[in-house]
Amino acid sequence: MAETADIVNLRRYRLIRNAVFVWLTLVVLGAFLLRIPRIHILEHTARNLYFHVPMWFTLMAAALVSAYHSLRYLQSGDPVRDLRAREAARVGIVFGLLGLATGIVWSRFTWYLGTSLWWNFDPKQSFVLIQLLIYGAYFVLRSAVEDPEKRGRVAAVYNLFAFVTMPFLLYVLPRQMESLHPGAEGNPAFSDITHPIMRLVFYPAVIGFIGLFWVLYTQRVRLALLERRLEMRKATMLEAKS
Amino acid sequence: MKLQALTDTAGIATPYDTIWATAAVPTKPPQGIERIMLAEDKLYVVLAVVLIIWFGLILFIFRTDRKLDRLERTLQERLPEANTGLSS
Protein backbone atom coordinates (compact mmCIF):
# COMPACT_ATOMS: atom_id res chain seq x y z
CA MET A 1 0.00 0.00 0.00
CA ALA A 2 1.14 3.51 -0.77
CA GLU A 3 2.76 5.79 1.80
CA THR A 4 0.60 8.38 3.54
CA ALA A 5 2.46 11.11 1.71
CA ASP A 6 1.21 9.72 -1.61
CA ILE A 7 -2.39 10.04 -0.50
CA VAL A 8 -2.31 13.15 1.71
CA ASN A 9 -0.32 16.17 0.61
CA LEU A 10 1.34 16.96 3.95
CA ARG A 11 2.79 20.30 2.89
CA ARG A 12 -0.60 21.53 1.80
CA TYR A 13 -2.14 20.12 4.98
CA ARG A 14 0.23 22.09 7.23
CA LEU A 15 -0.26 25.25 5.21
CA ILE A 16 -4.04 25.06 5.40
CA ARG A 17 -3.93 24.06 9.09
CA ASN A 18 -1.92 27.15 10.02
CA ALA A 19 -4.06 29.39 7.83
CA VAL A 20 -7.25 28.02 9.43
CA PHE A 21 -5.98 28.71 12.96
CA VAL A 22 -5.09 32.33 12.14
CA TRP A 23 -8.30 32.81 10.14
CA LEU A 24 -10.57 31.48 12.91
CA THR A 25 -8.80 33.63 15.51
CA LEU A 26 -9.63 36.69 13.41
CA VAL A 27 -13.22 35.46 13.04
CA VAL A 28 -13.63 35.15 16.83
CA LEU A 29 -12.14 38.62 17.33
CA GLY A 30 -14.48 40.09 14.72
CA ALA A 31 -17.42 38.20 16.18
CA PHE A 32 -17.00 39.84 19.58
CA LEU A 33 -15.47 43.24 18.81
CA LEU A 34 -17.56 44.58 15.92
CA ARG A 35 -20.71 46.54 16.67
CA ILE A 36 -23.95 44.94 15.51
CA PRO A 37 -27.54 46.25 15.33
CA ARG A 38 -29.60 45.93 18.50
CA ILE A 39 -32.46 43.54 17.92
CA HIS A 40 -35.26 42.94 20.38
CA ILE A 41 -35.11 39.51 22.09
CA LEU A 42 -31.86 38.62 20.33
CA GLU A 43 -29.58 41.40 21.64
CA HIS A 44 -25.99 40.14 21.75
CA THR A 45 -27.04 36.57 21.00
CA ALA A 46 -27.32 37.65 17.34
CA ARG A 47 -23.57 37.01 17.39
CA ASN A 48 -24.36 33.33 17.63
CA LEU A 49 -24.96 33.60 13.89
CA TYR A 50 -21.17 33.42 13.54
CA PHE A 51 -20.91 30.18 15.50
CA HIS A 52 -24.18 28.26 15.36
CA VAL A 53 -24.93 28.59 11.64
CA PRO A 54 -21.43 27.68 10.32
CA MET A 55 -21.79 24.36 12.19
CA TRP A 56 -24.58 23.44 9.76
CA PHE A 57 -22.68 24.60 6.71
CA THR A 58 -19.80 22.47 7.93
CA LEU A 59 -22.06 19.45 8.44
CA MET A 60 -23.31 19.84 4.88
CA ALA A 61 -19.78 20.24 3.51
CA ALA A 62 -18.71 17.13 5.42
CA ALA A 63 -21.69 15.19 4.10
CA LEU A 64 -20.82 16.30 0.58
CA VAL A 65 -17.19 15.16 0.97
CA SER A 66 -18.33 11.89 2.48
CA ALA A 67 -20.88 11.22 -0.27
CA TYR A 68 -18.33 12.10 -2.97
CA HIS A 69 -15.87 9.53 -1.65
CA SER A 70 -18.61 6.93 -1.26
CA LEU A 71 -19.54 7.46 -4.89
CA ARG A 72 -15.91 7.12 -5.96
CA TYR A 73 -15.63 4.00 -3.84
CA LEU A 74 -18.50 2.41 -5.71
CA GLN A 75 -16.79 3.29 -9.00
CA SER A 76 -13.26 2.24 -8.11
CA GLY A 77 -13.41 -0.10 -5.11
CA ASP A 78 -10.39 1.72 -3.69
CA PRO A 79 -10.36 1.12 0.11
CA VAL A 80 -8.90 4.60 0.70
CA ARG A 81 -12.12 6.10 -0.66
CA ASP A 82 -14.13 4.09 1.85
CA LEU A 83 -11.88 5.25 4.65
CA ARG A 84 -12.21 8.89 3.59
CA ALA A 85 -16.00 8.64 3.41
CA ARG A 86 -16.05 7.19 6.92
CA GLU A 87 -13.84 9.85 8.47
CA ALA A 88 -15.66 12.73 6.75
CA ALA A 89 -18.96 11.43 8.13
CA ARG A 90 -17.44 11.06 11.58
CA VAL A 91 -16.13 14.63 11.76
CA GLY A 92 -19.36 15.88 10.18
CA ILE A 93 -21.41 14.33 12.99
CA VAL A 94 -19.26 16.18 15.54
CA PHE A 95 -20.10 19.49 13.91
CA GLY A 96 -23.76 18.50 13.68
CA LEU A 97 -23.90 17.72 17.39
CA LEU A 98 -22.20 21.04 18.17
CA GLY A 99 -24.76 22.83 15.99
CA LEU A 100 -27.58 21.10 17.85
CA ALA A 101 -26.14 21.89 21.30
CA THR A 102 -25.50 25.55 20.46
CA GLY A 103 -29.00 25.87 19.03
CA ILE A 104 -30.53 24.47 22.21
CA VAL A 105 -28.68 26.99 24.39
CA TRP A 106 -29.43 29.89 22.04
CA SER A 107 -33.17 29.30 21.90
CA ARG A 108 -33.41 28.67 25.65
CA PHE A 109 -32.30 32.21 26.50
CA THR A 110 -34.05 34.06 23.70
CA TRP A 111 -37.32 32.75 22.33
CA TYR A 112 -37.99 30.22 25.10
CA LEU A 113 -37.22 32.74 27.83
CA GLY A 114 -39.41 32.38 30.90
CA THR A 115 -40.76 29.03 29.73
CA SER A 116 -37.92 26.86 31.12
CA LEU A 117 -38.01 24.98 27.81
CA TRP A 118 -34.79 23.56 26.38
CA TRP A 119 -36.46 21.69 23.54
CA ASN A 120 -39.72 22.70 21.91
CA PHE A 121 -39.72 20.55 18.74
CA ASP A 122 -38.73 23.32 16.40
CA PRO A 123 -39.08 21.59 13.01
CA LYS A 124 -35.53 22.30 11.88
CA GLN A 125 -34.13 21.12 15.19
CA SER A 126 -36.15 17.92 15.18
CA PHE A 127 -35.37 17.09 11.56
CA VAL A 128 -31.67 17.67 12.03
CA LEU A 129 -31.73 15.27 14.96
CA ILE A 130 -33.25 12.69 12.62
CA GLN A 131 -30.54 13.45 10.07
CA LEU A 132 -27.84 12.92 12.68
CA LEU A 133 -29.44 9.62 13.69
CA ILE A 134 -29.38 8.59 10.02
CA TYR A 135 -25.65 9.29 9.98
CA GLY A 136 -25.25 7.46 13.30
CA ALA A 137 -26.85 4.41 11.69
CA TYR A 138 -24.12 4.59 9.02
CA PHE A 139 -21.59 3.64 11.70
CA VAL A 140 -23.85 0.99 13.19
CA LEU A 141 -24.19 -0.51 9.72
CA ARG A 142 -20.42 -0.45 9.24
CA SER A 143 -19.79 -2.31 12.47
CA ALA A 144 -22.36 -4.95 11.54
CA VAL A 145 -20.62 -6.16 8.36
CA GLU A 146 -17.41 -8.19 8.74
CA ASP A 147 -16.10 -8.46 5.20
CA PRO A 148 -14.32 -5.18 4.30
CA GLU A 149 -15.34 -5.16 0.64
CA LYS A 150 -18.97 -5.92 1.36
CA ARG A 151 -18.95 -3.41 4.24
CA GLY A 152 -17.51 -0.73 1.97
CA ARG A 153 -20.14 -1.28 -0.70
CA VAL A 154 -23.13 -1.48 1.66
CA ALA A 155 -21.92 1.54 3.64
CA ALA A 156 -21.30 3.58 0.48
CA VAL A 157 -24.80 2.95 -0.82
CA TYR A 158 -26.32 3.79 2.56
CA ASN A 159 -24.17 6.92 2.81
CA LEU A 160 -25.48 8.16 -0.54
CA PHE A 161 -29.02 7.62 0.71
CA ALA A 162 -28.20 9.58 3.88
CA PHE A 163 -26.86 12.43 1.78
CA VAL A 164 -29.95 12.53 -0.40
CA THR A 165 -32.27 12.88 2.61
CA MET A 166 -30.32 15.90 3.86
CA PRO A 167 -31.77 18.67 1.65
CA PHE A 168 -35.28 17.50 2.43
CA LEU A 169 -34.83 17.24 6.18
CA LEU A 170 -32.77 20.42 6.52
CA TYR A 171 -34.37 22.66 3.91
CA VAL A 172 -37.58 21.56 2.26
CA LEU A 173 -39.57 20.27 5.23
CA PRO A 174 -38.63 22.89 7.89
CA ARG A 175 -39.52 25.67 5.47
CA GLN A 176 -43.10 24.47 5.27
CA MET A 177 -43.66 24.87 8.99
CA GLU A 178 -43.54 27.49 11.68
CA SER A 179 -40.04 27.66 13.05
CA LEU A 180 -37.62 29.97 14.78
CA HIS A 181 -35.35 29.74 11.79
CA PRO A 182 -35.20 32.28 8.97
CA GLY A 183 -36.79 31.19 5.72
CA ALA A 184 -39.43 29.14 7.51
CA GLU A 185 -43.15 29.65 6.94
CA GLY A 186 -43.93 33.30 7.65
CA ASN A 187 -40.32 34.21 8.43
CA PRO A 188 -38.10 36.46 6.34
CA ALA A 189 -35.18 34.79 4.60
CA PHE A 190 -31.65 35.21 5.88
CA SER A 191 -30.73 37.63 3.09
CA ASP A 192 -33.55 40.03 4.00
CA ILE A 193 -32.66 40.56 7.62
CA THR A 194 -28.91 40.29 8.02
CA HIS A 195 -26.94 43.49 8.36
CA PRO A 196 -23.84 43.85 6.09
CA ILE A 197 -21.50 44.07 9.09
CA MET A 198 -22.69 40.65 10.20
CA ARG A 199 -22.11 39.15 6.78
CA LEU A 200 -18.55 40.47 6.98
CA VAL A 201 -17.93 38.06 9.87
CA PHE A 202 -20.46 35.36 8.99
CA TYR A 203 -19.11 34.30 5.59
CA PRO A 204 -15.48 34.10 6.79
CA ALA A 205 -16.74 32.11 9.78
CA VAL A 206 -18.37 29.59 7.43
CA ILE A 207 -15.14 29.27 5.45
CA GLY A 208 -13.08 29.03 8.64
CA PHE A 209 -15.14 26.25 10.19
CA ILE A 210 -15.22 24.29 6.95
CA GLY A 211 -11.42 24.69 6.93
CA LEU A 212 -11.31 23.39 10.49
CA PHE A 213 -13.37 20.41 9.41
CA TRP A 214 -10.86 19.76 6.65
CA VAL A 215 -7.94 19.86 9.12
CA LEU A 216 -9.58 17.44 11.57
CA TYR A 217 -10.73 15.21 8.73
CA THR A 218 -7.24 15.03 7.24
CA GLN A 219 -5.81 14.14 10.66
CA ARG A 220 -8.27 11.27 10.93
CA VAL A 221 -7.52 10.11 7.39
CA ARG A 222 -3.80 10.01 8.16
CA LEU A 223 -4.51 8.04 11.31
CA ALA A 224 -6.76 5.60 9.48
CA LEU A 225 -4.15 5.10 6.76
CA LEU A 226 -1.55 4.21 9.40
CA GLU A 227 -3.97 1.82 11.07
CA ARG A 228 -4.65 0.14 7.76
CA ARG A 229 -0.98 -0.27 6.93
CA LEU A 230 -0.32 -1.78 10.34
CA GLU A 231 -3.11 -4.28 9.83
CA MET A 232 -1.83 -5.24 6.40
CA ARG A 233 1.66 -5.75 7.86
CA LYS A 234 0.24 -7.98 10.54
CA ALA A 235 -1.66 -10.00 7.96
CA THR A 236 1.43 -10.54 5.81
CA MET A 237 3.47 -11.49 8.89
CA LEU A 238 0.91 -14.06 9.93
CA GLU A 239 0.94 -15.49 6.43
CA ALA A 240 4.71 -15.70 6.48
CA LYS A 241 4.64 -17.54 9.82
CA SER A 242 2.15 -20.18 8.78
CA MET B 1 -20.35 47.15 -0.09
CA LYS B 2 -20.37 50.77 1.03
CA LEU B 3 -18.51 51.63 4.20
CA GLN B 4 -21.40 53.59 5.63
CA ALA B 5 -23.75 50.70 5.26
CA LEU B 6 -21.27 48.60 7.18
CA THR B 7 -20.76 50.90 10.12
CA ASP B 8 -24.32 52.14 10.49
CA THR B 9 -25.71 49.70 13.01
CA ALA B 10 -27.87 52.13 14.96
CA GLY B 11 -31.09 51.81 12.95
CA ILE B 12 -34.02 49.66 13.91
CA ALA B 13 -33.38 46.17 12.67
CA THR B 14 -36.05 43.73 11.63
CA PRO B 15 -36.82 41.20 14.35
CA TYR B 16 -35.55 37.78 13.44
CA ASP B 17 -38.88 36.14 13.80
CA THR B 18 -42.17 38.00 13.72
CA ILE B 19 -44.13 35.27 15.44
CA TRP B 20 -41.98 35.30 18.49
CA ALA B 21 -41.07 38.95 18.52
CA THR B 22 -44.69 39.91 19.06
CA ALA B 23 -45.23 37.37 21.82
CA ALA B 24 -45.62 38.68 25.34
CA VAL B 25 -42.36 39.48 27.05
CA PRO B 26 -42.18 37.81 30.49
CA THR B 27 -42.75 40.37 33.20
CA LYS B 28 -41.40 38.66 36.28
CA PRO B 29 -37.67 39.16 36.92
CA PRO B 30 -35.48 36.33 35.66
CA GLN B 31 -34.43 33.73 38.21
CA GLY B 32 -31.46 31.42 38.62
CA ILE B 33 -29.63 30.52 35.43
CA GLU B 34 -31.61 33.03 33.38
CA ARG B 35 -30.39 35.86 35.60
CA ILE B 36 -26.80 34.96 34.75
CA MET B 37 -27.37 34.41 31.04
CA LEU B 38 -29.38 37.61 30.52
CA ALA B 39 -26.73 39.88 32.05
CA GLU B 40 -24.75 42.20 29.74
CA ASP B 41 -27.48 42.10 27.08
CA LYS B 42 -27.28 38.30 26.81
CA LEU B 43 -23.59 38.31 25.91
CA TYR B 44 -23.01 35.26 28.12
CA VAL B 45 -25.23 33.20 25.83
CA VAL B 46 -22.66 33.80 23.10
CA LEU B 47 -19.90 32.85 25.53
CA ALA B 48 -21.74 29.61 26.34
CA VAL B 49 -22.13 28.79 22.65
CA VAL B 50 -18.44 29.44 21.93
CA LEU B 51 -17.43 27.31 24.93
CA ILE B 52 -19.66 24.44 23.78
CA ILE B 53 -17.94 24.46 20.39
CA TRP B 54 -14.51 24.78 21.99
CA PHE B 55 -15.03 21.90 24.42
CA GLY B 56 -16.64 19.78 21.72
CA LEU B 57 -13.62 20.21 19.48
CA ILE B 58 -11.24 19.50 22.37
CA LEU B 59 -13.13 16.31 23.14
CA PHE B 60 -12.80 15.21 19.52
CA ILE B 61 -9.06 16.02 19.44
CA PHE B 62 -8.60 13.97 22.62
CA ARG B 63 -10.36 11.03 21.01
CA THR B 64 -8.08 11.28 17.99
CA ASP B 65 -5.15 11.38 20.39
CA ARG B 66 -6.32 8.26 22.19
CA LYS B 67 -6.54 6.43 18.89
CA LEU B 68 -2.99 7.54 18.11
CA ASP B 69 -1.80 6.27 21.50
CA ARG B 70 -3.41 2.91 20.86
CA LEU B 71 -1.73 2.68 17.49
CA GLU B 72 1.65 3.47 19.00
CA ARG B 73 1.16 0.84 21.72
CA THR B 74 0.21 -1.79 19.15
CA LEU B 75 3.35 -0.99 17.22
CA GLN B 76 5.56 -1.34 20.29
CA GLU B 77 3.95 -4.32 21.98
CA ARG B 78 2.76 -6.62 19.28
CA LEU B 79 5.42 -6.08 16.68
CA PRO B 80 8.53 -5.24 18.69
CA GLU B 81 10.97 -7.03 16.44
CA ALA B 82 9.29 -6.30 13.14
CA ASN B 83 10.22 -3.51 10.84
CA THR B 84 6.76 -2.05 10.41
CA GLY B 85 7.89 0.31 7.71
CA LEU B 86 6.16 3.20 9.45
CA SER B 87 9.33 5.14 10.13
CA SER B 88 10.51 5.03 6.55
Image: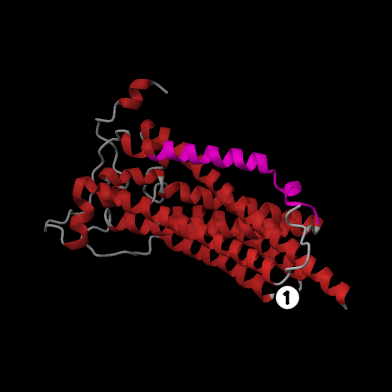
Residue at coordinates 73% horizontally, 63% vertically from top-left? A228
A127 lies above or below B53:
below
Residue at coordinates 31% horizontally, 64% vertically from top-left? A118
In the rendered view of the protein, which quadrant contains the N terminus of chain A?
A: bottom right
Q: Quadrant of residue A125?
A: bottom left
Type of colouring: secondary structure
Residue B80, position as x, y percentages in the image: 73, 68
Residue A96, position as x, y percentages in the image: 49, 57
In the rendered view of the protein, which quadrant contains the C terminus of chain A?
A: bottom right
Q: Quadrant of residue A198?
A: top left
Which residue lies most toward the bottom here? A242
Q: Nearer the viewer, residue A39 or B31?
A: B31
Magenta span: chief secondary structure = helix
Residue at coordinates 68% horizontally, 52% vertically from top-left? A68
Residue at coordinates 47% horizontally, 55% vertically from top-left? B57
Question: What is the three-letter code of the residue carrying label 1?
Answer: Glu
Can residue A164 be seen at all in this image of the molecule? no
Residue A98 on the magenta segment: no
According to the picture, the residue beneath numbered tag 1 turns out to be A146
Q: Nearer the viewer, residue B57 or B25?
A: B57
Q: Nearer the viewer, residue A43 or B73?
A: B73
Q: Which range is magenta?
A: A1-28
Residue A211, position as x, y percentages in the image: 55, 43
- Chain hosting mark 1: A
Q: Nearer the viewer, residue A152 or B85?
A: B85
**Label 1: element kind:** loop
